[in-house]
Image: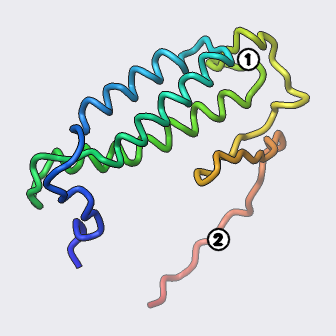
Amino acid sequence: MPPWAVWPRWDRQHGGERVAPLRAEMQRILQAHCGVYRREDLLRAGIDQLGQVEARLADAVIEDRGKVFNTARLEALEMENLLPVARATLVSALARTESRGAHSREDYPLRDDDHWLRHTLYSRGDDRLDYKPVRLKPLTLATLQPTVRTY
């Protein structure tokens, strides 16, 4: 089966809007709602607006349905991958109630190592977050001894 056969939705001939304006809108949402300086109301509004873009992408079309060197198809596939990453960024930033590094919450100006010295793990299906501790002790591995190659 050729690789493009798994994306038949992009072969529709009629439908909604083009992908490029949706990508530009996603970019604008992230710049306006998830910049360096963040607040809860901005993040929530960004999540809502991004949801609308996600819904519109479901009906988007590409004009060039060629199978070879099709940059419109690549742009559409990139957008399908970028939207979940944008959503994970917004949802994770909303949950993190502290300021740390380039993540600066105006409503939570202090760093909070007691609660937030951990990695955030995002589950796409239901916007669920999980956390993993930060290991402060370095891990050491035994060195591999050189051996003879055998095949």
Q: CA distance from mark 1 to mark 2?
A: 45 Å
The x, y position of residue 81, in whole percent, is 40, 47
Work out which residue is located at the far bottom of the displayed protein and give it: 151
Quarter of the rendering containing residue 106: top right
| Image location (x, y in percent) of residue 126 | 64, 50
> Which mark, by number, is residue 146?
none
Q: Residue at x 43, y 41 (%)?
A: 54
Q: Are the two marked residues, 1 and 2, in contact with CB atoms closer than 8 angstroms?
A: no
Relative height, residue 128 to residue 146 (above, below): above
The kind of residue on which mark 1 rests is Ser
- Vertical placement of residue 110 versus 143, above or below: above
29 left or right of 16? right
Image quadrant holding the N terminus, namely bottom left
Q: How is the image coloured?
A: rainbow
Tell how many labels.
Answer: 2
Q: Is residue 12 above or below residue 138?
A: below
Camera-side residue of 135 and 57: 57
Assign a secondary structure to mark 2. Answer: loop
Please identify the quarter of the rendering in which residue 16 is found. Answer: top left
Q: Residue furthest front?
A: 15
User: Mark 2 highlights which residue?
Assistant: 145
Image spot of residue 75 (x, y percent): 25, 43
Which residue is identified by label 1? 99
The image quadrant that residue 18 belongs to is: top left
Establish if 108 lies above or below 26.
above
Please state which of residues 31 and 142 is positioned toward the viewer in this rendering.
31
Q: Amino acid at mark 2?
A: Gln
